Structure formats: C-alpha cells, structure tokens
Amino acid sequence: MQKNQKEEDLYRKQVTEAAGYVKKSLGSGVQTAVITGTGLSGSLMNLEVDSQVDYAQIPNFPLSTVQSHAGRLISGRVCGRRVLVMQGRFHLYEGYSAPMVAFPVRLMQVLGVKNLVVTNAAGGLCRDYAAGDIMAICDHINLTGENPLVGTNFDDWGIRFPDMSAAYDHGFIECGFRAAQKAGIVLQKGVYAGLKGPSLETPAELRYLRQIGADAVGLSTVMEVIAAVHGQMRVCGFAMITNIADPDHPEPATIEAIIGAAEKSAPKLGQLISNFVREI
Ligand code: HPA
C-alpha cells in the first residue's frame, strides 16, 4: 500500500460525505455549476436562489480565509436554468493542498454536475487588453508546481493520465462568444497562467509569462480545472481582467484595487454568464 493511501481514502470519504449533505440540503440533478472568483461573488445579479448553505455547514468542506470570498453554496436558477453557484473558492496560497482546493469540484462531480463555469480575477498580460475586459480562457499554464491528481488515482473518478489537449471546451468557448455578442460585450480569448502566489509578480516574471504565451495571470483556477477535466466535466473559464500587468511600466498592485476592479465589472460578467447558461 502506498504511504498516503489512508489519507487519500479519507479524502474520498470526506468528499462523499459532503456531497451527501449538499444533496440533502440543496437537492441534486443540477447539470451546471459556476465558481465565482475574487470580487465576483455578486456577479450573478439575476440568480434566483432556491436554497443555500454556508460552507461552514457542509461537513469536511474547507473554509475560505479570503475576505472577498463569500463562502456559500447556492442552488438556484439563471434565466430559468438550474445552476449550482459556489460563492468563494479556495487557493493554494491560503495553505490548502491541491486536493483540498479541488474539493468542491469533486463534490460537484459526485453530485453529477457535467458543466463547470470557472471565473477569476486576473492581471492582463496581452498588449491588446484593457482593465475591465473579460477573457474567455482557451487554455492554461499550470505554474503552481502542484497538481490535484498526484497520488493514488481513483479510477471511477477519472483516468490516471487525463488528456488536457482541450481542457476548455471548444464548443463552450463558441457559446461564450455568442453569449457575449448578444449582451454587447467584447470578449477576449487567451491563455491563463496560474501561479501559487500570494506574492504578485515581479516585472521579470511578467516578461517571462508573456514570453511563454500567457495572456493573463492569476492565482486560482488551474487546480479546479484539472480536477474537472479528470472528472469528465466540460469546462468554460472567464477571466475578469482587473489590472494590466505590464513589465515595461510596472505599477504597484494591491489586492484592494484588484477586488475593487472585479466588483465594478462583476455585473458585466454576470450578464455574460447568464447568457452563456442560456446558450448551452
Ligand atoms: N496577478 C496575479 N493575480 C491577479 C492579478 C495579478 O496582476 N490581478 C488579479 N489577480
């Protein structure tokens, strides 16, 4: 038996128990889930809430240590479509392990969720981007040095070496563009680089990120997406560009400014997600 087998079996048991609680509290059968990122928990303005639970009520569920994250799981409707909304997520920089960051995605998988919409706040690296833009994530670069699939593979959750050649579903990206067009929103498309943080990037790091093909940078998303792809979910990602990360004109970045910018643009993202949910 592998050294960590016991720990991994416990993780699986904890996910199953948490999913059982959520099923009892919120019901099951929801096909689409949305994870809202930093400053974006209020983005779904037209969400009709059917029922909700605080993360603290869910057995074994991690607790958000980040102020800007609400910590609530909501079952509701957007444009008449049922959605499960996770207001507040977990990050490696909070000290959570990769499997714990992916815990909610595993819970969703056990509940039968098939479509995952991930959102985040990100720094814009592409020269064409402006603060306030939304970027459809077409691919990612995992620079965290972590992976939620390390260790024993649970074959009934997914295969040992999941294909990542189309982690962000191509059909969903097209839906995203249709949804944006209908809402009159300009949508960018690019590659998201996921870092561990919590320190933000140096100018040399930003230059490096540009050179390796990243269009936006942030501190979340990649663990969740890897777990979701492993769990055969179709994934769609939207990055809210809260600031321009320009290595040649470095400006001090603060988390307060990032949260403020995300909150300001949250309704636009909410509109996009609502239209998207209607399209899929
Ligand atoms: N860097 C990392 N994460 C971020 C940024 C950034 O510039 N903006 C929003 N999230």
Image (cartoon, helix red, strand yellow):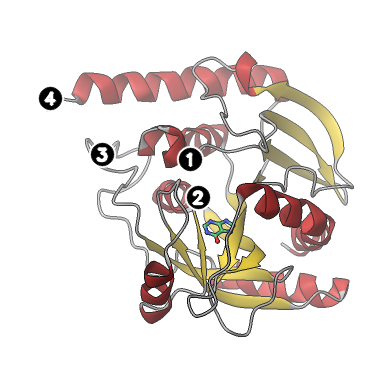
Circle 3 packing at 10 Å, graded few (<14), some (14-19), many (20+), is few
Residue 19 appears at what percent x and percent y? 55, 24
Instruction: From this view, report whether residue 252 is shown above or below residue 213.
Output: above
Query: Residue at coordinates 33% horizontally, 18% vertically from top-left?
Result: 10
- Discs 1, 4 touching: Cβ within 8 Å: no
- Name the residue beneath numbered marker 3: 153
- Discs 2, 4 touching: Cβ within 8 Å: no
Q: Is residue 256 visible?
A: yes
Measure the alpha-carbon separation of dots 1 and 3.
22 Å
Measure the alpha-carbon separation of dots 1 and 2.
6 Å
Distance from mark 3 CB to nearest ligand 1 atom below 8 Å: no
- Name the residue beneath numbered marker 4: 3
- Chain-order first, disc 1 or disc 4: 4
Measure the alpha-carbon separation of dots 2 and 4.
28 Å
Q: Which one is nearer the viewer's eye here, 11 or 119?
A: 119
Considering the numbered disc 4 on the image, is that residue within a helix, a strand or a loop?
A: loop
- Chain-order first, disc 2 or disc 3: 3
Query: Which mark is nearer the camera, 2 or 3?
Result: 2
Instruction: From this view, report whether residue 132 is shown above or below residue 143.
Output: below
Q: Is residue 102 visible?
A: no
Considering the numbered disc 1 on the image, is that residue within a helix, a strand or a loop?
A: loop
Measure the alpha-carbon separation of dots 1 and 4.
25 Å
Q: Which one is nearer the viewer's eye here, 113 or 134?
A: 134
Q: Amino acid at mark 2?
A: Ser
- Name the residue beneath numbered marker 1: 91
**Mark carried by residue 220:** 2
Measure the alpha-carbon separation of dots 2 and 3.
23 Å
